[in-house]
Amino acid sequence: MTERLYSTDQYARETEAAIVDVDPDDGRVLLDRTVFYPGGGGQPHDVGELVIGEDRLAVVRVAEDRRGVWHWLDGGLPRAGTSVLGQVDWERRYRLMRTHTAMHALCGVVWERFASPVTGGNMEPGTGRLDFELPDWDPEDKAPIEAELNRQLEAARPVEIAFLPRDEADRDPSLIRTKVSLLPESLREVRVVDIVGLDRQADGGTHVASTREVGRVRIGKVESKGKGFRRIRLVLDDRSARSAGSA
Ligand SMILES: [Zn+2]
């Protein structure tokens, strides 16, 4: 299995690693350790480079299976056993971390006001959308929700990661905010992302350490997605960004 550094050290931008398997048919390599997020929970996979001596091989796709985290490379494949330096495209990843944390903060704000569960979501660097079961939504609600969301982000709430034993997580149904995605049976340990005092949910993605790093956000279009369902879009307002995590 691949050691997943992104799970415990979300600010790790690079790591030494060894190629433990090569799949020439699919153009991908398996690493013993990685900082590349393989995608999941609405957050896209990372991209970046594997550095081998003078060579830089582009990592164009990342995904996981039972064996670990696979990295698809542009061009020729190195041999198994090769030592590499894996480097994520940090600018893109850091925007995804800010976007992902903003989305959890929006979950918390909508939950506090409407007790509405999330039914789905997706993001790109800098923009995201969340679907809610939200029968009581009124167009007038948009401005106060946006103001409250920015107030919560500005409050510099810590964002903490914890790992709970499966049985403990099962006793806390509030951890599963997304109605549709239940935890797989095989999962022994559940990773929990806690925006302290605002939102706590089971999640495998990468987040910033404080809501203040998100900066300001704008709520975009709110669409109806069938009776009682709404899709809320948010956008990072990068003119106001506090780029604590960028180089
Ligand atoms: Zn999430």
Image: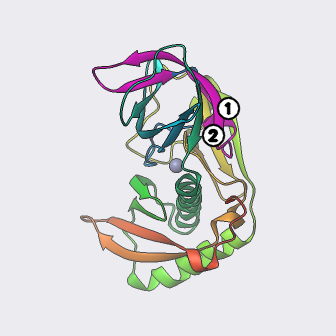
| Residue identifier under label 1 | 163
* Amino acid tagged 2: Val
Left-right relation of 236 to 73 = right
What span is in magenta?
A: 1-30
First in sequence, mark 1 or 2: give its number: 1
Left-right relation of 92 to 64 = right
Along the line of sight, which residue is nearer the eye, 157 or 198? 157
Dot 2 crowding, Cα within 10 Å, few <14, some 14–19, many 20+: many
| Residue identifier under label 2 | 192
Quarter that holds the C terminus: bottom right
- Local SS, label 1: strand
Q: How many marks?
A: 2
- Please report the residue visible at 37 percent of the width from the left and 43 percent of the height from the top: 180
The image quarter containing residue 70 is top left
Question: Residue 41 placed where, x, y %?
Answer: 45, 44
Left-right relation of 221 to 245 = left
* Amino acid tagged 1: Phe
